[in-house]
Amino acid sequence: MARRCLPWLALASLPLAAPLSALEPPSTVARWAAACNGCHGPEGLGSGAMPALRGQSADALAAKLLQWQNDPEAAAATGHVMARFAAILDQETLQALAKHYGTAP
Amino acid sequence: MNRRRFLTHAGAALLGASSLSVALPSAASSRGPHASVLILGAGFAGASLAWALKRWAPSLAVTVVAAPERYWTCPFSNTALLKPADLKALEVRYDAFSEAGAPTLIRARVRAVEPEHRALVLEDGRRLTGDKLVLAPGIELATEAIDGYDDAAAARFPHAWEAGPESLRLAKQLRAVPDGGLVVMTIPPNPYRCPPGPYERASLMAWWLQQHRPRAKLLLLDGKDRFTKDALFKAAWAARYPNLEWQGLSDGAGLRRVDGKTGLIETDFDRFSPDLANVIPPQRAPALLRRAGLDGGQGWCPIEPTGFESPLAKDVHILGDAAIANPMPKSAFAANSQGKACAAALIADLAGVPRPDPVLLNTCYSLVAPDAGIAVVGSYAVQGGRLESLAAGSGLSPSRSALGESVTAVRGAEAAHARGWYDSIRADAFREGGPHS
């Protein structure tokens, strides 16, 4: 009995005890959003000429990504960077990202 | 007790607690009820990793060990050549690391890496371990690879390839160049930190000379024949900078020898006595990692691409410039992207579940003039166990000829994007604002 209790006693004395089972890898959209934030800043809030994603409507974000996906050449002049990244997003991730940053209609 | 000492003690306490936990039996995992990640380096890779871990797994004990020296970001440090006062804003202060819930930051020099124990031995004798050890120490300059490079050469030829006082030294020497003078930049063969960096620097130096020393000349002596964004850079130079000349390896521009006493720069075909020589040495992974055998004798450290784990040491991961992550370049954005991808992989490993596919991207902006920028974009995926470029997700800014009359507006927009990019990635990696915000 004493032996079985020992780990629990030790745990109680630790400041940061948290079960490893609580660890869960971030979702696909969380990992993609983290990548987006590299250019668009923490939480996608933007800085200077780098546009904010947070606060745009989810529909507008999805439409813009789809436009780049469908016509990357048209984006060459101003949006070539985003046209490349949009090109490798699958539809599920694209929509999930738009919802992640965007506001509901 | 000052803040640094407090953090030092807090770090030691956390690590002590986590080592204790490793010894505890647990139903969850043989690693114990909670886990620790120990990170060497607080540049774009190490800092991004630390914050991503705290975000996605707040219960993890995350400790970052970084050198006590001041740190300025390499991105945007070339602009300090134009306005030295701008360097100040590039210094990272790590203020956010003292907030609640932040990773623990220990400013200390590291004497040794012990991969088999996932341990760092600090210069003061402390030995830290983690369930995972991540090494993101950046680069080391391989100056002895240049014949004749001695203390006199180091004093005479600034490299400015670590930003900070070196950037100011180069800016000062540029201002001492007489009109009609000769400036030389020697550029190493691949691989090295920031592939487009020398060419952005050359563009901004040529711009400055054009304004202030209109009869001076800038000669680039390159140890290779092709370089990133070369068509875009060369077109910009042809249009803007008649004072700039580029010579590649096939032109005989390979660096043979330097002489710090006489100022001589010797290439395969020629000898120069410039008024200023910016000698950018070849580079490699820092000695700490090479002494631990983590480079496998290659100078840079191999990794497997799903979690950037060393194939030479289990539970030791290597990120950023020190790693061989081809085709990803040694860039700040790549380091930031690798930090986040590695965070997801570490959490998966510690939880005992499969690693998710890494999201690995790169965006590099370069200024060809203060108001004109170009960009290269890359996307990467693991295919057949190797990291590969995704063609659809990679590309360059459009060429001058494709843009026609809109070239000024488009390059101007990309220069503005470059400044926004800097502030964003600075805030993302270090949780503090940049100069343009």
Image: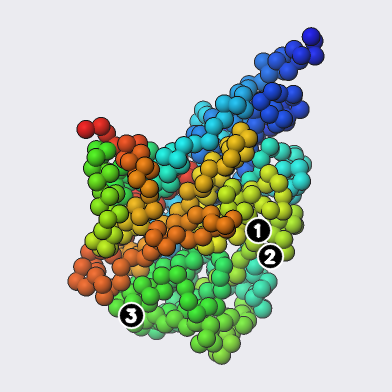
Q: Amino acid at mark 2?
A: Gln
Q: Please, which chain is the residue tagged with disc 2 on?
A: B
**Is residue B421 at least partly visible in the picture?**
no
- Percent coordinates x, y for residue B399 in the rendering: 30, 71
- Picture residue at 37% right of the left edge, 65% below the top: B396
Colouring used for the render:
rainbow
Crowd around label 2: few <14 · some 14–19 · many ≥20 (10 Å):
few
- Which residue is most to the top? A1
Q: How many numbered marks have been drawn onto this rendered protein structure? A: 3
Q: Please, which chain is the residue tagged with disc 3 on?
A: B
Q: Which residue is mark 2?
A: B298
Where A54 falls versus B434 (above or below)? above
Secondary structure, mark 1, is strand
- Picture residue at 64% right of the left edge, 49% below the top: B309
Q: Which mark is residue B13?
A: none
Q: How far is disc 1 from disc 2 in space, using C-alphas?
A: 7 Å
Q: Are marks 1 and 2 in contact (CB under 8 Å)?
A: yes
- Picture residue at 44% right of the left edge, 38% below the top: A30
Location of residue B259 (image quadrant): bottom right
Q: Amino acid at mark 3?
A: Ala
Where B210 falls versus B388 (above or below)? below
Q: Which residue is mark 3?
A: B238
Q: Which residue is mark 1?
A: B301
Q: In the image shown, does B416 or B147 lie closer to the viewer?
A: B416
Q: In the image shown, does A28 or A35 lie closer to the viewer?
A: A28
Q: Please, which chain is the residue tagged with disc 1 on?
A: B
Q: Earlier in the sequence, mark 3 or mark 2?
A: 3
Secondary structure, mark 2, is loop
